[in-house]
Image (cartoon, coloured by chain):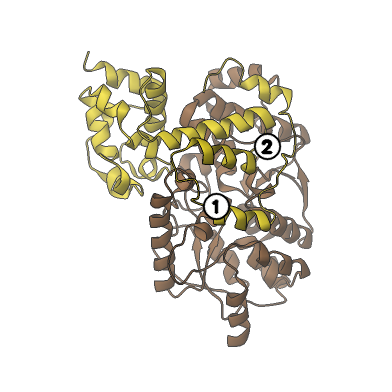
Chain colours: A brown, B yellow
Amino acid sequence: MTYSYYPGCSLHSTGLEYGLSTRAVFKHLGLELNEVNEWACCGASSAHALDHTLSLALPAYTLSKAQAAGHDLVIPCAACYNRLRNADHAMKHDQSIRSQLETMLDFEYSGSVAVRPVLAVLAEDVGLERIRAKVRNPLEGLNVVTYYGCLLLRPPHITHFDDAEHPHVMGDLLRETGVNVRSWSHATDCCGGSLSLSRSDVVQQLVGRLAERACEAGADAIVTACPLCQVNLEMRQTGRVKIPAFYFTELLGQAFGLPEANSWWGRHLIDPRPVLGSMAAAA
Amino acid sequence: METNLVIEVDRVSSQQVEQCYHCHKCTAGCPIVGAMTYGPDLLLRMVSLGQTETVLRSRDIWLCVGCFTCATRCPNDIDIAAIMDGLRRMALERGFPAGERDALLFHRLFLGVIQRFGRSHEAFMLGLFKFLSRVPLMNDVPAGIGLFVRGKIPLLPEHFRAPAPVRRLFQGKRL
């Protein structure tokens, strides 16, 4: 199976280990990822905050590049996924926006590219059984909560992924690795996103509450599917005890016994190795 | 004059503010409301009352992070996050100073970097933000160093110039 792949800016910088672990997991599952040729930034929250046309045109540009390749487009980053779905939705349902973007970008929109998050590809195309069959190193004894944040799920008429208030796909995948997925009420709460630099006090408060509630739920770590959530979670905790934030792809890679997993942990601002070590000790 | 604000906000956001019956669900679920002055529900009421200045000068429209919790839960399917986007653009067009200066600075620097390089470049953007924002200079320096030593803030951009079609998208825009 071959997919087009849009890493987005974060996966080449602050979310480095999300990109590394996504590629490693896909390779291990026999799935090919072809990076979209000459992709550009999706504009993230800044474009839609300031300029409506730009907030559609930037993701539409990358979509036009993916359209030429012809495969399903896989996107790990929640913000990129949201913006590309948004542009795709606008071009599908609004003829005037579509012609405007087609003229601006000199392409013809076909609507043939399925824009999909990594979680959906693993759950639907690979399936839980194949994930389970690949586990060599069960993560029994590791307690986590799953954290989706905002942009993978909302607004639901754009994202069309999982359940916007009660998502379960990440937990379904992780349970196959033996992880103990604890229940909590904050899986879809916001981390404060792009306010991280200008109002770090707001983000500290939101992240602090998430970390506190995760601990109360009995979790040793939070598992995310968004590079901005992950960096906010690890950078903005101010409490005495800090808990790490894994990408779900990292835990899959660890459970599959991939040797490169060991090179991901040192990339974290909060070292997750003690948590992985205590799991080994408990097992 | 007073009702014109509703018409204008509806137009820039493709929403219908007048559908709101003030159930307060948006404010109840807003993660940022603690830092806001009014919160989304009250802001919509002020829009229908035509309080243009207060709304467009408010910090609330700049604090909204676009998490879409309000848009997802609104019983009348009003995309309140889209209204916030529209209000920000109106505030800029009419020359109101941003209620959260550094939030606007961040968006401008971010888009400036995309215009030049086609992709985000943290080192460049964070460096400028540090010097231009009112956030104390030494804030986040340890975290920035932490990211740098972990190889997560490359010094050089991946491309030195955005692809031509991307550069064209920015033509004539004053962001």
Residue at 73% across, 32% down: A65
Q: Mark 2 or mark 1: which is in front?
A: 1
Q: Residue A48: horizontal and vertical position, in percent?
A: 49, 31
Q: Amino acid at mark 1?
A: Val
Q: Is residue A44 above or below residue A118?
A: above
Q: Is B111 or B9 nearer to us in this picture?
A: B111
Residue A72 in the image, given as x and y percentages of width and height: 70, 43
Reply above or below: A109 against A31: above
Q: Which residue is mark 1?
A: B141
The answer to whether marks 2 and 1 sit on the same chain is no
Image mark 1: chain: B
Residue occupying image coordinates x 61% and y 21%: B170
Label 2 lies in what chain? A
Per the image, the residue denoted by label 2 is A113
Q: State which quadrant residue A280 falls in.
A: bottom right
Residue found farthest to the top: B1
Query: In terms of depth relative to the viewer, which is nearer, A116 or A11?
Result: A11
Q: Separation of disc 2 and disc 1 at Cα?
A: 41 Å
Residue B45, image x, y percentages? 22, 31
Which one is nearer the viewer's eye here, A54 or A74? Answer: A54
Residue plotted at (74% across, 55% down): A23
